[in-house]
Image (cartoon, rainbow, N blue to C red):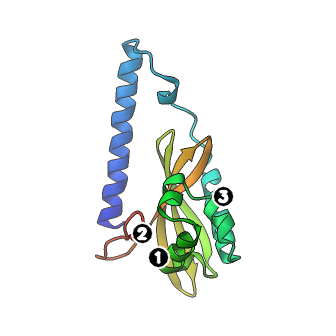
Amino acid sequence: MTPRLRAWVLGLAGGLVVGAGVFRYLQNNSVVLPATLLPIVEPNPRDLYQIVELQIAALRRNDYTTAYTFAATGIRQKFPREQFREMIRSSYPQLIGDTRVSFGETRFAASVKASALVFLESNGRSASMIYLFVKENGHWKIEGVQVIKTGSQEGLPLEPQT
């Protein structure tokens, strides 16, 4: 595990512990929380994996219109559909190629945030990515993708720079 990924995982775990402690304190002291702050049951990680699989399948079919539907509102505001297509082609070409996709660990930072580790392999080359999800109107959407580089190289920015 790279130092950057290790720091990210430790930060996420620390945030979850602090959040759980605050929630317990509020509950034990009879503080009434709005419904939006109450914990919900975490989704099955398979639900997140399916979103990634469906978007990659659309990209491989050159169906950027369908692939775009899996993007969160923030991504769609930043990248209109044609710019989204160009961003994927230039920043994430490994998503378009004939690759084998496998999945690693998922994390849930809150009822509206999640991440999943995705591995892509093709012709002896591999790429690891962290997919970030946000829940919008009851549905998980892809909020960003970070490519994890091995060795001393740093990962790419969370969102591609324009």
Instruction: Give residue 61's position: percent from left, percent from top.
Output: 71, 76
| Badge nearest the viewer, 3 or 2 | 2
Q: Quadrant of residue 147?
A: bottom left
Q: Which residue is tagged 2? A: 160
Marks 1 and 3, Cα distance to the nearest angstrom? 22 Å
Q: Can you name the residue that lies furthest to the bottom here?
A: 123
Which residue: 60% across, 54% down?
48
**Relative to 24, does residue 144 appear above or below in the rendering?**
below
138 sits to left or right of 32: right
Whole-percent x, y for residue 129 in the image: 47, 67
Q: Tell me the quarter of the picture where residue 102 sits.
A: bottom right
- Circle 3 Cα neighbour tier, 10 Å, few/some/many (<14 / 14–19 / ≥20): few
Which amino acid type corresponds to the residue marked 1 in the rendered image? Ser
- For disc 1, the marked residue is 91
* Badge 2 density bin: few <14, some 14–19, many ≥20, Cα 10 Å: some
Label 1 crowd (10 A; few <14 / some 14-19 / many >=20): some
**Marks 1 and 2, how far apart in space?**
7 Å
Please tell me the numbered disc located at residue 50: 3
Q: Quadrant of residue 120?
A: bottom right
Give residue 60's position: percent from left, percent from top.
67, 76
Is residue 131 visible to us here?
Answer: no
The first of marks 3 and 2 along the sequence is: 3
Q: Is residue 73 above or below residue 129?
A: above
Contact (Cβ within 8 Å) of mark 1 with mark 2:
yes
Kind of element beneath mark 2: loop
Residue at 47% from the left image edge and 61% from the top image edge: 78
Whichever of callouts 1 and 2 sits on the residue coming sooner in the sequence is: 1
Residue 155 appears left or right of 105: left
The amino acid type, in three-letter code, at marker 2 is Pro
Q: Nearer the viewer, residue 94 or 64?
A: 64
Foreground label between 1 and 3: 1
